[in-house]
């Protein structure tokens, strides 16, 4: 059973589709469900995560600097297949404990993004594990925690809005030293790839399906595709800015602002036009 503090977070997380208030309002959190090493029963724990690209996220078994590994870590050592709930997306993942140089690189990125991890390591003699959670692919559409197709598209859009807002805040607060941190680069590139994949899915699957069902909507989809092209160009500009080690961080911040303005307008228009069409049969 989760402790009372964790249960309050879990309840709020589930009630608000991953959004939290207070101290965790700007944190990247997920719900990790592991299988008990001794009991074989499921246990759900809220944990912080770091984007790692390619359908993978990293979680850190800090236990607040305790000398004892957290229960969820010992569980996944025994049963590496775990459940992941982002509040919007739910999926199964394979847990892999990183070691050697891969662990050190991931740890350095984590500490660069949040010095609190280093503070936890100083409190204990155990080497704090870094665990990669690799999504296990499955056929069909993603499992989205929504009650209707219209709600699903809005929730997915909100994921992009929230992540972009987090990236903007990280760029403002963390690039004063004249460089972009390694983890911030990963966050940006993960966001860019996710947005590209989302728009590709809309262009090839959703838009043709809705256009066939709703004659007369061609101008809407023509505009949305044109906006996808403009956003793709802005995403590429951002990718170049964050992968150029010699670039001024101000350039990357400017590209994020340009992308934010275009994307916000696009998402709003898309929701206004598509949600009524998506929910028309419900």
Image (cartoon, rainbow, N blue to C red):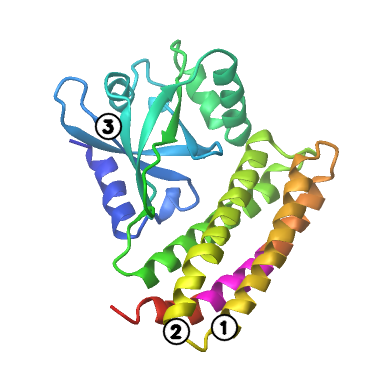
Helix, strand or loop for disc 3:
strand
Residue for point 49% across, 40% down: 55
Helix, strand or loop for disc 2:
loop
Determine which of the numbered discs, if any, sits on residue 34 in the image.
3
Instruction: Name the side, left or right, on which 5 lies relative to 130.
Output: left
Determine which of the numbered discs, if any, sits on residue 214 in the image.
2
- Is 20 magenta? The answer is no
In front here: 279 or 175? Answer: 279
Q: Are marks 3 and 1 in contact (CB under 8 Å)?
A: no
Q: Quadrant of the C terminus?
A: bottom left
Residue at mark 2 to residue at mark 3: CA–CA distance: 44 Å
Q: Which residues are magenta?
A: 260-270
Instruction: Name the side, left or right, on which 45 lies relative to 209.
Output: left
In front here: 86 or 201? Answer: 201
Q: Quadrant of residue 144?
A: bottom left
Instruction: Mark yes or no: residue 61 visible.
Output: no
Q: Are marks 2 and 3 in contact (CB under 8 Å)?
A: no
Give the residue at mark 1.
218
- Is 269 magenta? The answer is yes
Mark 3 packing: few (<14 Cα in 10 Å), some, or many (20+)? many
Q: Quadrant of residue 138?
A: top left
């Amino acid at each position: 059973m989760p402790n009372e503090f964790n249960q309050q977070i879990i309840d709020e997380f589930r009630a608000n589709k991953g959004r939290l208030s207070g101290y965790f309002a700007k944190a990247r959190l997920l719900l990790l469900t592991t299988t008990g090493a001794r009991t074989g029963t499921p246990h759900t724990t809220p944990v912080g995560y770091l984007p790692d690209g390619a359908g993978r996220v990293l979680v850190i078994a800090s236990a607040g600097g305790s000398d004892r590994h957290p229960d969820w870590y010992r569980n996944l050592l025994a049963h590496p297949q775990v459940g992941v709930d982002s509040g919007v997306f739910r999926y199964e993942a394979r847990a892999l404990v990183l070691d050697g140089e891969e662990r050190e690189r991931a740890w350095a990125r984590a500490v660069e993004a949040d010095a609190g991890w280093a503070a936890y390591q100083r409190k204990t003699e155990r080497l704090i594990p870094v665990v990669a959670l690799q999504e296990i692919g499955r056929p069909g559409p993603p499992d989205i925690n929504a009650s209707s197709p219209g709600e699903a598209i809005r929730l997915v859009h909100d994921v992009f809005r929230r992540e972009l807002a987090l990236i903007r805040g990280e760029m403002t607060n963390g690039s004063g030293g004249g460089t972009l941190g390694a983890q911030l680069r990963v966050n940006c590139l993960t966001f860019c790839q996710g947005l590209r994949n989302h728009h590709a899915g809309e262009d090839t699957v959703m838009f043709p399906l809705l256009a066939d069902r709703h004659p007369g909507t061609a101008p809407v989809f023509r505009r949305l595709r044109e906006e996808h092209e403009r956003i793709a160009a802005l995403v590429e500009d951002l990718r170049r800015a964050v992968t150029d080690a010699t670039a001024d961080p101000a350039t990357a911040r400017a590209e994020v602002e340009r992308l934010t303005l275009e994307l916000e307008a696009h998402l709003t228009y898309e929701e206004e036009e598509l949600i009524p069409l998506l929910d028309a049969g419900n």
